[in-house]
Image (cartoon, rainbow, N blue to C red):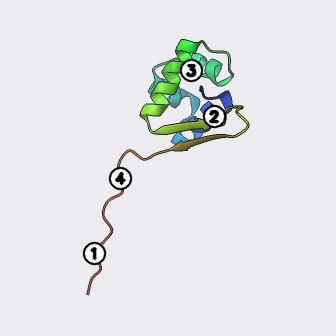
Amino acid sequence: MYPTPNQLRAARALLGFNQEEAARACGVSGRTLLSVENGKGSLTTLHTVMGAYLGLGVVFDASQDYGRQSVSVQHRVPPGPPPIPED
C-alpha cells in the first residue's frame, strides 16, 4: 500500500522538516515534493519520497480501505543505558 498525501505531510512534520528540507533529504525539488504531497506526482517520484522517509525511520500504516491511517517514526539509535543509581 502506498502512503496517502496526508500521510506524506504527516511524515514530514514528524521528522521536523519544512518542505525545502524534506525535498533536499529526498533528493527531489521542492516543486516535486509539493506535487507528491498533493497526490499529483508520478509513481516513480512517490517511490523516491517514500523510500527516503522509510530510510529515516518513518513507518506508514493503513487499513485495507484506508479508513484507518497512521504514521510513526522509529528511532534508529536505541536509547542509552539508564543511569546507575548512586549509593
Q: Residue furthest bottom?
A: 87
N-terminal label among 2 and 4: 2
Asked if marks 1 and 4 touch (Cβ < 8 Å), the reply is no
Indicate the amino acid at tag 3: Gly
Q: Residues within 10 Å of mark 3 (few under 14, many from 20)?
A: some
How far is disc 1 from disc 2 in space, using C-alphas? 40 Å
Is 18 situated left or right of 4 in this image? Answer: left
Q: Nearer the viewer, mark 1 or mark 3?
A: 1
Indicate the amino acid at tag 2: Gln
Residue at image mark 4: 78
Indicate the amino acid at tag 4: Pro
Q: Residues within 10 Å of mark 1 (few under 14, many from 20)?
A: few
Q: Residues within 10 Å of mark 4 (few under 14, many from 20)?
A: few
Indicate which disc residue 30 carries.
Answer: 3
Q: Give the image location of residue 38, x and y in percent.
A: 69, 22
Residue at image mark 2: 7
Image quarter in which the N terminus is found: top right
Q: Give the image location of residue 27, x and y in percent.
A: 45, 20
Residue at image mark 1: 84
Asked if marks 4 and 3 touch (Cβ < 8 Å), the reply is no
Which residue does the image show at 49% across and 31% down from the upper left? Answer: 53
Q: Residues within 10 Å of mark 2 (few under 14, many from 20)?
A: many
Q: Residue furthest front?
A: 64
N-terminal label among 1 and 4: 4
N-terminal label among 1 and 2: 2
- The picture quadrant where one finds residue 82 is bottom left
How far is disc 4 from disc 3 in space, using C-alphas? 32 Å
N-terminal label among 3 and 2: 2
N-terminal label among 1 and 3: 3
Q: Give the image location of residue 59, x and y in percent.
A: 52, 38
How far is disc 1 from disc 4 in space, using C-alphas? 18 Å
SS state under label 2: helix
